[in-house]
Image (tube, grey):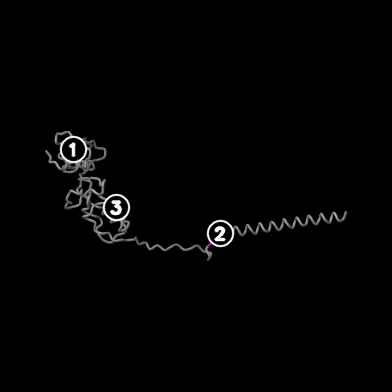
Amino acid sequence: MHHRIRATAVAVLTATLITAVGCTEDATNDDTSSGSTRDTPENGEPAPDEPSTGTPETAALPDLTGKGLQAAQDAAQEAGFSDLTSHDSAGRDRMQAFDRNWKVCFQTPAAGEHPVDVEVDFGTVKLEEDCPAQDVTGTGPDAAEGTMPDVVGESANVARDALPDNTSITVNDASGEKRMVLVGSNWQVCSQEPAGGAPFDGEPVTLNVVKFEESCP
């Protein structure tokens, strides 16, 4: 009777000790695992940020006038400049859809040392055209408020740009051949109604045009 009680007590004590040891090992493992995931600098302080000089990177922009537009763009990119644009130096508002068909007459900024994030603008004309004496970068003639701008001699595109967006415009072939004016930058204005300088307050506008290689009638 007494031997059975003593054996039972020993078994209970042994089970209690095993459970206690297991809990201690789990707690130790949890602490170790938790500590291994902490991302703490060795000195206990966050690393300082890199100081900023505030000075933009610069590079030498070469003189690219006289080159084909595609070659000029490639050379500018090789020099470190990526913000590139171009325009029609003849003032006809033509798009440079195929870069290899255009040549560079002007560039802004000029050759020299510049920040690499500066916009480089190439003034261009078609390969078969001569460079103009001056670069034309505007969008057309200005006129005082309430006055019709004088667009004679301008391209049909430039004439449209000089008028308010809500203007009703009719474009006629002045040669009498009744050709359709599909690409306005290829046509020049021979006459207009209302005339340049006349009072203007939203009246419909008529432009009579011929192709640039043709003479006005």
Which span of residues is magenta-colored? 36-40
Q: Measured from the top left, where is residue 166 in percent x and y?
A: 26, 38
Which residue, given by chain and number where applicable, does mark 3 sit on?
Answer: 84
The amino acid marked with disc number 2 is Arg
Please identify the quadrant where the N terminus is shown. bottom right
Along the line of sight, the residue nearer the viewer: 123 or 100:
100
Would you say the residues marked 2 and 3 are in contact, meaning their CB atoms lie under 8 Å apart?
A: no
Q: CA distance from mark 3 to mark 1?
A: 34 Å
Q: Which mark is residue 207?
A: 1
Q: CA distance from mark 2 to mark 3?
A: 47 Å
Q: Quadrant of residue 150?
A: top left
Instruction: Residue at the far bottom: name it.
Output: 43
Magenta segment: does it hold 71?
no
- Mark 1 is surrounded, within 10 Å at the Cα level, by few (under 14), some (14 to 19) or many (20 or more) other residues, namely many
- Mark 2 is surrounded, within 10 Å at the Cα level, by few (under 14), some (14 to 19) or many (20 or more) other residues, namely few
Q: Is residue 197 visible?
A: no
Disc 1 secondary structure class: strand
Q: Which mark is residue 38?
A: 2
Q: Measured from the top left, where is residue 9 in percent x and y?
A: 81, 56
Q: Of circles 2 and 1, which is in front?
A: 2
Of pointers 2 and 3, the one earlier in the residue sequence = 2
Instruction: Residue at the far left: name it.
Output: 217
Disc 3 secondary structure class: strand
The amino acid marked with disc number 3 is Leu
Q: Is residue 54 left or right of residue 176?
A: right
Of pointers 2 and 1, the one earlier in the residue sequence = 2
Compared with residue 177, is residue 112 higher up or lower down, i.e. above or below?
below
The amino acid marked with disc number 1 is Leu
